[in-house]
Image (cartoon, rainbow, N blue to C red):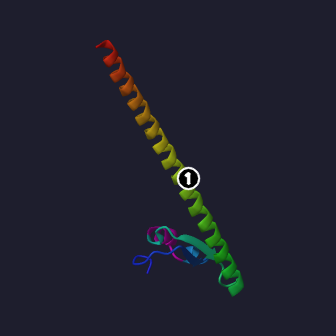
Amino acid sequence: MLQSQEFDIIVIDESFPQLETGAESLIGSHAGTAMPIYVNLSLYGVQRVVSDVSRGLQRLVGERLASMRAAENLLRNELCGQGTAILLKSELALREVHFLRVLR
């Protein structure tokens, strides 16, 4: 399912990496952008698992919002820099045209 669909979170039993050799690389190679949440299914009840998953989703949403804001700021700065460069070049070109007219 990990290869055919995209997930936000993957809930993994804490014992899985200890029992399966190469589990970390298996999870990493198939999880995509999903955030792994490790729980101890032998000790945790349903409420604890739900609580951990809810906190993980909140953390994921916060991280995505922060990433989007950072990308937006980067793009805004890039566009402002390019806009300023265009304005400066236009102003210099207008000055040059004006200077050439004065010389005539």
Main secondary-structure element of the magenta-colored stretch: helix
Q: Residue at x 44, y 40 (%)?
A: 83
Q: Position of residue 18 (x, y in %)?
A: 58, 74
Q: Residue at x 51, y 44 (%)?
A: 77
Q: Quadrant of residue 58?
A: bottom right
Residue nearest the observer in this picture, 59 or 87: 87
Q: Is residue 98 visible?
A: yes
Residue at the extreme bottom of the image, as rendered: 46
Please, is residue 76 above or below residue 4 in the view?
A: above
> Is residue 42 found inside the magenta-colored segment of the image?
no
Identity of the amino acid at label 1?
Answer: Ala
Q: Quadrant of residue 11?
A: bottom right
Residue nearest the observer in this picture, 60 or 68: 68
Q: Is residue 45 visible?
A: no
Q: Secondary structure at mark 1?
A: helix
Which quadrant is the C terminus positioned in? Answer: top left
Residue nearest the observer in this picture, 76 or 90: 90
Which quadrant is the N terminus positioned in? Answer: bottom left
- Residue underneath mark 1: 70
Q: Residue at x 57, y 55 (%)?
A: 69
Mark 1, Cα crowd under 10 Å, few <14 / some 14-19 / many 20+, is: few
Q: Position of residue 22 (x, y in %)?
A: 49, 70
Please, is residue 69 above or below residue 38 in the view?
A: above
Which segment did they paint magenta? 20-29
Q: Tell whether 103 sits left or right of 85.
A: left
Q: Quadrant of residue 63?
A: bottom right
